[in-house]
Image: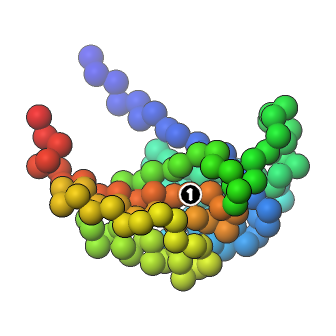
Amino acid sequence: MTSTYQQMIFVNLAVNDLDASKKFFTELGYSINPQFSDDNAASVVISDTIVAMLLTKPFYASFTKKEIADATKTSEVLVALSAESREKVDELVEKALAAGGSPAGETQDHGFMYGRSFDDLDGHTWEVVWMDPSAIES
């Protein structure tokens, strides 16, 4: 018997300005789930199985004893999202730049794989990648 359970990922990110970060991600086309959002956190629905939890720094600090990284100076994570085409890669990155994000790294074009990156308002790096499905079939 096969399971229909879909494992999810919740990426928790410390943000400086929760309202500005919510606006940024909604401008990318994502929605905020109000059921899991309040004055300390916003649940950004990226897909059925991917959620970015934007947490104010004091709230984020309540989950760890470690120092919170300043993502504008230190890389703490690289979040990579798949895209269904090269055009969708460009579309999402251009939306991010128009919403106040900044370019991160060079465009990667290997023919069968294409990717671009951006930093969000707090410096977290998001990679958007398309891979030709025929190049990865076994």
**Few, some or many residues within 10 Å of mark 1 (<14, 14–19, 20+):** many
Q: Can you tell which quarter of the image residue 137 is in? A: top left
Q: Quadrant of the C terminus?
A: top left
Q: In the image shown, does 22 or 104 lie closer to the viewer? A: 104
Please tell me which residue is depicted at 34% across the width and 24% down the height of the picture: 3
The tally of labels here is: 1
Type of residue at label 1?
Thr
Q: Is residue 1 toward the left or the right of residue 9 in the image?
A: left
In the picture shown, does residue 133 fall above or below 84? above
Task: Give the colour scheme of this rendering.
Answer: rainbow
In this view, the residue farthest toward the bottom is: 98
Please tell me which residue is depicted at 59% across the width and 79% down the height of the picture: 99
Q: Is residue 127 toward the left or the right of residue 31 in the image?
A: left
Q: In the image shown, does 106 or 118 lie closer to the viewer? A: 106
Give the residue pinned by disc 1.
Answer: 125
Residue 57 location (% of width, % of height): 83, 52
In the picture shown, does residue 51 fall above or below 7? below
Q: In the image shown, does 94 or 41 lie closer to the viewer? A: 94
